[in-house]
C-alpha cells in the first residue's frame, strides 16, 4: 500500500467515530461489517449499538428498518465504502421512504479493509455522496477535513433530517476492538435495550 496515498486525507477514522455518537442520548447505532464495527466498539460498546458480523451491504437496510419502526429515535448508520458499494440499491429505498430520523455516515478510506486493503471504486471516479443525492437524498455531501466534520455533526445528531455524509478518512490498519461475537446475544441485548422488558419477547 502506497503510504503517501494512504495518508492523503487528514481525518483518522477512530477519532471521527468517537465524535459521532458523543452525547447520543437514545440514538440507535448500526455499525457495518468489519472495520466500522471495530471503530464503533472502540468508541464505546453499549446495548444500543448493533454491530454487524456479516451481511455485507446490509447496514443501511437495517438502519432504514429501525428508523421506520422507531420514528421517535435518531438512527445512525456508520459503515465503510466497501460495504456501501455492496448495498448501493438500499440508498434508492431510503430516498423513497425519506425517514427524517436516519443519518448515514460512510467512512471512506478507499479500501476493502478486511481483505487486504485493496482499492475500492471510490479511489477512482465513484462518488458515493453524488450517488446518494442522485437517488433522492438531498442532504448528501462529502467531508474531507475537520471543519467539514464539525459542521456535519449537528445534522448527524438531530432527529429532523435525513442525511448522508461520505467522510474521507486515512487508510490505516488499526488494532481490532471487537464487539461480542454472539449474534443472538447482540440481537437480544439490542432488543431489550430498545423495547424494555415489557415490549421484549423472544
Image (cartoon, rainbow, N blue to C red):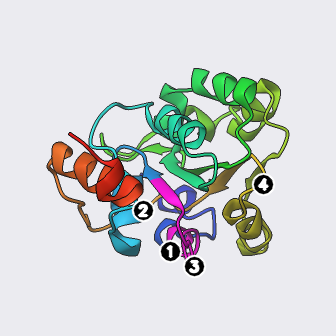
Q: Residue at x 40, y 55 (%)?
A: 194
**Relative to residue 92, is residue 67 drawn left or right?**
left
- The magenta stretch is 15-29
Among the two numbered marks 2 and 1 on one chain, the one whose residue lies closer to the N terminus: 1
User: Which mark, residue 172?
Assistant: 2
Residue 23, position as x, y percentages in the image? 57, 79
Proximity of marks 3 and 1: CB atoms separated by less than 8 Å: no
Q: Which residue is mark 1?
A: 18
User: Which mark, residue 23?
Assistant: 3
Distance from disc 2 to disc 1, alpha carbons, whole Å, reads: 16 Å
User: Which mark, residue 180?
Assistant: none
Q: Residue at x 56, y 56 (%)?
A: 5
Q: Residue at x 68, y 32 (%)?
A: 126
Among the two numbered marks 4 and 2 on one chain, the one whose residue lies closer to the N terminus: 4
Distance from disc 4 to disc 2, alpha carbons, whole Å, reads: 34 Å
Distance from disc 3 to disc 4, alpha carbons, whole Å, reads: 17 Å
Proximity of marks 3 and 2: CB atoms separated by less than 8 Å: no
Name, please, the residue furthest toward the left: 182
| Label 1 neighbour load within 10 Å: few <14, some 14-19, many 20+ | some
Please identify, in this view, whether the residue under mark 4 or under mark 2 is nearer the observer. Answer: 4
Distance from disc 3 to disc 1, alpha carbons, whole Å, reads: 10 Å
Amino acid at each position: 500500500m502506497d503510504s503517501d496515498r494512504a495518508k492523503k486525507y487528514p481525518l483518522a477514522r477512530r477519532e471521527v467515530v468517537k465524535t459521532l455518537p458523543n452525547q447520543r442520548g437514545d440514538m440507535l447505532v448500526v455499525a457495518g461489517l468489519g472495520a466500522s464495527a471495530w471503530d464503533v466498539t472502540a468508541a464505546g460498546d453499549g446495548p444500543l449499538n448493533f454491530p454487524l458480523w456479516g451481511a455485507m451491504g446490509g447496514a443501511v437496510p437495517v438502519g432504514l428498518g429501525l428508523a421506520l419502526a422507531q420514528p421517535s429515535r435518531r438512527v445512525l448508520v456508520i459503515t465503510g465504502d466497501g460495504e456501501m458499494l455492496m448495498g448501493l440499491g438500499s440508498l434508492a429505498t431510503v430516498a423513497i421512504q425519506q425517514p427524517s430520523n436516519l443519518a448515514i455516515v460512510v467512512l471512506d478510506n478507499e479500501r476493502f479493509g478486511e481483505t487486504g486493503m485493496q482499492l475500492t471504486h471510490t479511489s477512482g471516479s465513484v462518488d458515493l455522496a453524488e450517488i446518494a443525492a442522485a437517488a433522492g437524498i438531498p442532504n448528501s455531501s462529502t467531508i474531507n477535513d475537520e471543519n467539514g466534520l464539525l459542521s456535519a455533526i449537528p445534522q448527524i445528531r438531530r432527529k429532523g433530517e435525513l442525511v448522508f455524509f461520505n467522510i474521507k478518512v486515512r487508510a490505516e490498519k488499526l488494532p481490532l476492538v471487537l464487539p461480542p461475537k454472539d449474534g443472538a446475544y447482540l440481537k437480544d441485548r439490542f432488543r431489550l435495550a430498545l423495547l424494555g422488558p415489557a415490549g421484549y419477547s423472544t
